Image (spheres, helix red, strand yellow):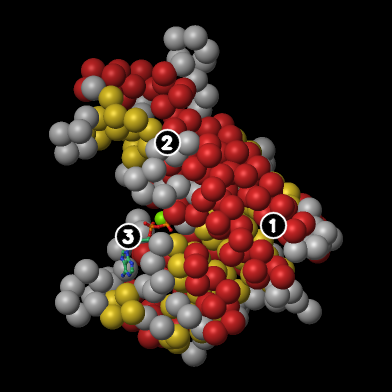
Amino acid sequence: MPKVITVALGGNAINKPGQKGTAEEQFTNVQNTTRQIAKMIKKGYKVIVTHGNGPQVGTILIQQEAGSKQVPPMTLDICGSQTQGQIGYMIQQSLGNELKSAGIDKTVVSVVTQVVVDKNDEAFKNPRKPVGPFFDEEHAKKMMIEKGESWIEDAGRGWRKVVASPIPKGIVEIEAIKSLVSAGFMVVASGGGGIPVIVNDDCTYSGVEAVIDKDRAGEVLAEEVKADVLMILTDVPYAAINYGTPEQKNVETIKLSEIKKYFDEGHFKAGSMGPKVASAIKFVENGGEKAIITSLENALEGLENGKGTVIISD
Ligand code: ADP
Ligand code: MG
């Protein structure tokens, strides 16, 4: 049986710091990324991909605002679905081409994915995740009063809307994703952490204004497809303890109980490395063989030779 790997791609897989984010730049970045993924597929691994969408959804939100005098702006959940389409497309084409050149006949397919969150999640009481462009105080106050939105003043840079970042509970399209994977398709799913939806009293779904962390959603995806490995690829080769201090030390292969201790001691920053380590812990705790946090360049090395932070059970 080929090993099933769920790969969560970080922001740098699509957008490099300092770039404008043109279509050409993004395509080049995605091509570099899919080259790494293709290496795993060539080795016989079954790969399922998920990805972030921060810069892309930010751009779409600016476009909504700039065009709002001509066409109605779309809501955050719809903007999120747009990013799943645009990033999914780039991965489908780039990875498809890469596999074709290697003589591998595999169709890459993206699934527009809704991820269920609890409407009573504590995060909704205290929205903290900034989204979209900066505005002046007048606009912010207007939105707070008219739409009941939450806005914060960001260190003199202006006002920004903030939304909740609730915990993902499940994936609406999971049975379709599983069928595609077992039929041999290369699936991209749950992009940008998925489109957050709540379950209504009559069991229907509705989109909500929120952002789900892509590493946490990737973990739910990995668990639900019963992946052997959760691999989180980012811009650093290791999670480190005492990060940013002279005592900084890379975490290499580590047992669950040890990394949990480091996590509880607060070594991994909330909003960046924190959710990665938390997701890795949850995956192994719930029966996954191992979770790997490493850089994009080290993907195959991480899988085959344990390069990176590799979390295993006790
Ligand atoms: P991604 O887009 O891949 O999710 P993030 O910026 O969210 O990337 O997370 C990766 C970043 O986490 C690294 O670039 C690093 O600056 C930061 N980081 C915070 N704490 C740690 C830590 N303990 N060890 C390593 N990196 C850390
Ligand atoms: Mg991140």
Of marks 3 and 1, which one's residue comes earlier in the chain? 1
Q: Label 2 sits on what residue type?
A: Gly
> How many numbered marks are there?
3
Looking at the image, residue 73 lies above or below residue 218:
above
From the viewer's side, name the closer residue of 162 and 199.
Answer: 162
Is there a contact, CB below 8 Å, between mark 3 and mark 1? Answer: no
Residue depicted at 44% across the width and 54% down the height:
12
Whether label 3 lies within 8 Å of ligand 1 gets the answer: no
Q: Residue furthest top?
A: 70
SS class, disc 1: helix
Whether label 2 lies within 8 Å of ligand 1 gets the answer: no
Residue 128 in the image, given as x and y percentages of width and height:
32, 44
- Taking the image as drawn, is residue 178 in sight? no
Residue depicted at 34% across the width and 22% down the height:
143
From the viewer's side, name the closer residue of 248 and 296.
Answer: 296
Of marks 2 and 1, which one's residue comes earlier in the chain? 2
Q: Residue furthest bottom?
A: 314
Q: Residues within 10 Å of mark 2 (few under 14, many from 20)?
A: some
Q: Split into 4 quadrants, where in the image is the N terminus?
A: bottom right
Q: Residue under circle 1?
A: 98
Residue depicted at 28% across the width and 25% down the height:
135
Foreground mark, 2 or 1, reads 1
Residue depicted at 66% across the width and 64% down the height:
38
Residue 54 in the image, given as x and y percentages of width and height:
44, 44
Q: Residue under circle 2?
A: 58
